[in-house]
Image (tube, helix red, strand yellow):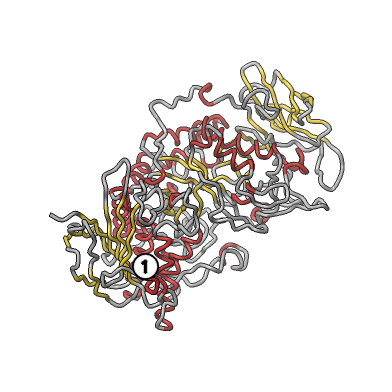
Amino acid sequence: MPPHDPLHDLGVRAGAHGGVARVWSEHATSVELVVFDADDLDWAIARTPLVRDEHGVWQGESADLRSGAHYGLRVDGPPGVEHAFNPVHTLLDPYARGLARAHDGSWRGVALEPLTATGFEWGDSVRPRVPLDRTVIYETHVRGFSKLNTAVPEPLRGTYAGLAHDASLDYLVNLGVTTVELLPVHAFVSEARLVRQGRLNYWGYNTLAFFAAHAPYASASARAAGADAVRREFAGMVRLLHEAGLEVVLDVVYNHTAEEGREGPTSSFRGLDNASYYRHDAHGRYVDTTGCGNTLDFSGAAPQRLVLDSMRYFAEELQVDGFRLDLAATLGRDEHAAFTPDHPLLRAMLEDPVIGETKLIAEPWDVGPGGWQTGNFPHGFAEWNDRYRDRMRDFWLGDLRRERESGSAGSGIGRFATRLAGSSNTFSGERGPLASLNFVTAHDGFTLADLTAYDTKHNQGNGEGNRDGTDSNNSYNHGVEGDTSDPAVRAARRRSIRNLLGTLLLSAGVPMITAGDEFGRSQRGNNNAYCHDSELNWLAWDPAGRPRSAPELLATTGRLLRLRAENPALRPIRYDRAHEDVPNSSQMDWFTADGTTMDIEDWNSPEQRTLQYLAASTPVAEARNTILLVVHAHESDVEVVLAAHDGVGGYTLLWDSADESPADAATEHAPGEHITMTGPSMRLYRAHAGA
């Protein structure tokens, strides 16, 4: 940041001959930098009082603050219900790039020089910069992805290096995804409640330090070598993923910290300036919009700067390609705790010359008042579209249940079609369909296979009496709860999986696949497996650990990803407008099963469960392309008259969800031809001009 900025260069700048520490605390009366012996982190070898400037920044120099030094802060301040100062506690610098832990359990920062100053080289690695319309996100966990992969050397399994191993890269590239989104890799710890239960926080949504990579995900050799080696392994992972053409997006948790509620551990922010970093009511109690015990107060400049500096560090120094912002509504709450899309932190992300060039993805809700904000983030953010998730689950699963039980699905096809075409009823025309981050599953909730096999959650193993995890799953077990040997039920479940997966990958918007869904991974009905570091969460690589149908489903996923890449009509950048030629949109026409144009009654009728969706692209940089997607959502067969449209001379069948495996040979069909579709299923055709 420019030197006149009062919050510039916070943290430690260390070199071979010492360094400078800059720490912000508005209410502290004294701040002391303490440097510890490298071999005994309880033994202080140097103490330096820091001096406060008029902006609340405390600064001091120490010859002992050399690269690799272990350090902490001791802070004192006034009493009061909103404060938690205690000069006896050694606190972690919020800007620490590396971490180490003392015998008493407290944390030390490790002073690190800039990455390139340590000899790390990026070589020929460049950011892939995948356009958003071509982006397919693969949400995964660093440890869980490679932990069981015997093609990865044992010391690297479950590590940053394991994710970047050739076996991992080959799998991801061959699958056809473009962007790997990693569950939290900022240094985190398990909540005190879990520790008392002998459990741990596997997912990582409990951040301890926003500038340090989580050390347990590094290989044992890197951990033994220290914080700089951990950072180098993380950077090496990014470099190798980039060389394979894959982007790296981080799931980041800035909305709260690992200090939990007022009875939780004091490791950093609470002891540094509790009143300024966290939200409180008039009585000094925490205002919790995250459900995690505390909420960072982003009405203040210093917490805002903390987030921006952390994002800039990972984007610039460690070269990551984007960020998924957990509970992002919290980041947009003003001094009155009300969400505003014009919040200075959100605007600063977009306007920052480094952060603004990355992919920015908002989880557009939190648990506070007015916390559901899907569709309300500013242009430049993509948003997790929970309306898409719920509608597609309900269409293929809930409606199927209702039709079996009562003879009527209860809803027609109009709302499904709106989501399929990019959710224009949720996102503004300026933002377009790429504002919609489409997903059917994510790390929290049922896996895709479990959506089709369980009506209710089975979270008894979480130690919370099955009270945790959502009860609103929009799932359908197809008549049997859990595992079954019934061939008809198993076949129906597989077809539902293919319909959901096909819908996700053929919809307008940005699709996200949850790791393992591509081969039918199950969590045995657990829809909140956050505390299980076990095979319940780890990806199975041995065929014996996967469903028998895994090869067919994996082939289906690969085919759908290839078809999405090859057909720009499936991935418009802008919304179409009637009677206009909008560049980079897809002109859409909708037909009934008999080939006639749909009218308002067809859109809303509960009996109308079959449609034909003709989309013609208007790309600027690609050849024109037209597809026909036929969706049939009854279990009974239906005769469909393929839509006739000006300029369309024929159709090539590319994929049929009724097939267990993608067909090897394409078949040709003519407009007006009668075809029979088994249900429920969907077919994708490519249209071509007549002779």
Of 662 and 339, which appears nearest the observer?
Answer: 339
Of 414 and 374, which appears nearest the observer?
Answer: 414
* Residue assigned mark 1: 496
Residue 130 can be seen, yes or no = yes
Q: Position of residue 342 (x, y in %)?
A: 61, 45
Q: Is residue 425 left or right of residue 174?
A: right
Residue 518 can be seen, yes or no = no
Of 35 and 315, which appears nearest the observer?
Answer: 315
Q: Position of residue 236 (x, y in %)?
A: 45, 33
* Residue type (three-letter) at the residue carrying disc 1: Ser
Image: 176 above or below 495: above
Residue most extreme to the top: 17
Give the image quarter of residue 61: top right
Q: Is residue 260 left or right of residue 419?
A: right
Q: Residues within 10 Å of mark 1 (few under 14, many from 20)?
A: many
- Residue at image location 30% in from the left, 70% down from the top: 592
- Residue at image location 41% in from the left, 80% down from the top: 408
Image: 574 above or below 636: above
The local secondary structure at tag 1 comes to: helix
Residue most extreme to the front: 579
Q: Is residue 427 left or right of residue 33?
A: left
Of 155 and 7, which appears nearest the observer?
Answer: 7
Image: 210 above or below 414: above
Residue most extreme to the right: 79
Q: Position of residue 614 (x, y in %)?
A: 30, 60
Give the image quarter of residue 590: bottom left
Q: Position of residue 338 (x, y in %)?
A: 68, 52
Q: Quadrant of the N terminus?
A: top right
